[in-house]
Image (cartoon, grey):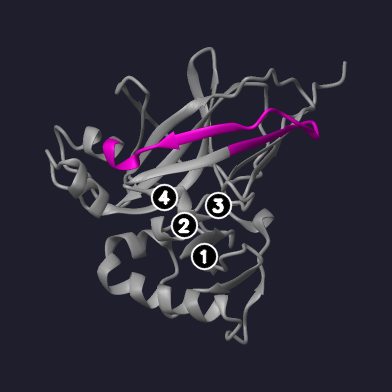
Amino acid sequence: MKLASYADGSRDGHLVVVSRDLTQAHYATGIATRLQQVLDDWGFIAPQLEDLAVQLNHGKLRHAFAFEPAKCLAPLPRAHGWAVVDAEGGVRREVGGFAAPHQPLRAPAAGEAVLAALTGDLAAASDRASALDALRLLTLALDWRIGGDLVATQCAPVAVTPDELGDGWAAGRLQARLVALHNGAKLEPRDVTAAPGDALARLARLRALRAGQAAGVALGALDLSLAAGDSLHLDLKTAAGQSLFGAIDLDIAPAPSA
């Protein structure tokens, strides 16, 4: 299933279920209103959302509406922690919440694409298999830094369960293509692979993780220079070109006039 959080004036937004093709949505009211509720009680709530998703995908929900990514916050705006594991196994513990997929940056910054994994409760010293069992949802994120300092983390509009990834998910590993447009010009796509279970197990070596913890797998820095007034479109897609999580679309604030 695919889930998103529509902005409603609250800190956490309102949970919606999104169709497989990212065109339709339906409020999850009556089942859960926030994604954190789902992560806290996954075994009870997730099957109900799955049923709603099946009906949505088959066009059987009378009150479905067109999905609008521009109305989304990050799927989980206030995670219980955010840490990124790099290719060498190093861990960077980040601070702050997740920004919306269309929130503009106030200044040019260096960006790094990250596959973000949202977990259920995971005991300390859990192995990779246990970590994969605790993996609930995946999404695309972008860490933005200025001079090495994290200034923002933006998320794609939709978080998905691994079973929604189709051929892009095998043996606990994501395989996808990172596609970017810089000021409307297409950059060279990048094939990426990531094992979020390994990242979760790495974080759980010394301490337990609670439901709502986010672990990132670094997918590499963005090979471009951003300037004031620039725009960026970033998306993770299947080999067939289908968007997995919806795109991150952002603008960098133009330089102030003299």
| Disc 2, SS | helix
Q: Where does label 2 land, which residue?
A: 166
User: Circle 4: is it few (<14), some (14-19), or many (20+) Cα within 10 Å?
Assistant: some
Observer-side mark, 3 or 1, equals: 3
Question: Of label 4 and label 3, which has the lower sequence position?
Answer: 4
Q: Where does label 1 land, which residue?
A: 14
Residue 249 shows in the view? yes
- Between the C-alphas of marks 4 and 3, the distance is 11 Å
Give the residue at the far top of this rendering: 147
Question: Of label 1 and label 4, which has the lower sequence position?
Answer: 1
Label of residue 244 in the image: 3
Q: Nearer the viewer, residue 166 or 158?
A: 166
Q: Where does label 4 land, which residue?
A: 169
User: Circle 2: is it few (<14), some (14-19), or many (20+) Cα within 10 Å?
Assistant: few
Which region is colored magenta?
178-198
Question: Of label 2 and label 1, which has the lower sequence position?
Answer: 1
**Amino acid type at image mark 2:** Gly
User: Circle 3: is it few (<14), some (14-19), or many (20+) Cα within 10 Å?
Assistant: many
Image point (67%, 20%), residue name: 224
**Amino acid type at image mark 3:** Leu
Residue 163 image point, x, y percent: 40, 60
Q: Nearer the viewer, residue 169 or 90?
A: 169
Question: Of label 3 and label 1, which has the lower sequence position?
Answer: 1
- Between the C-alphas of marks 4 and 2, the distance is 6 Å
Image point (50%, 25%), residue name: 220
Quick check: 209 above or below 26? above
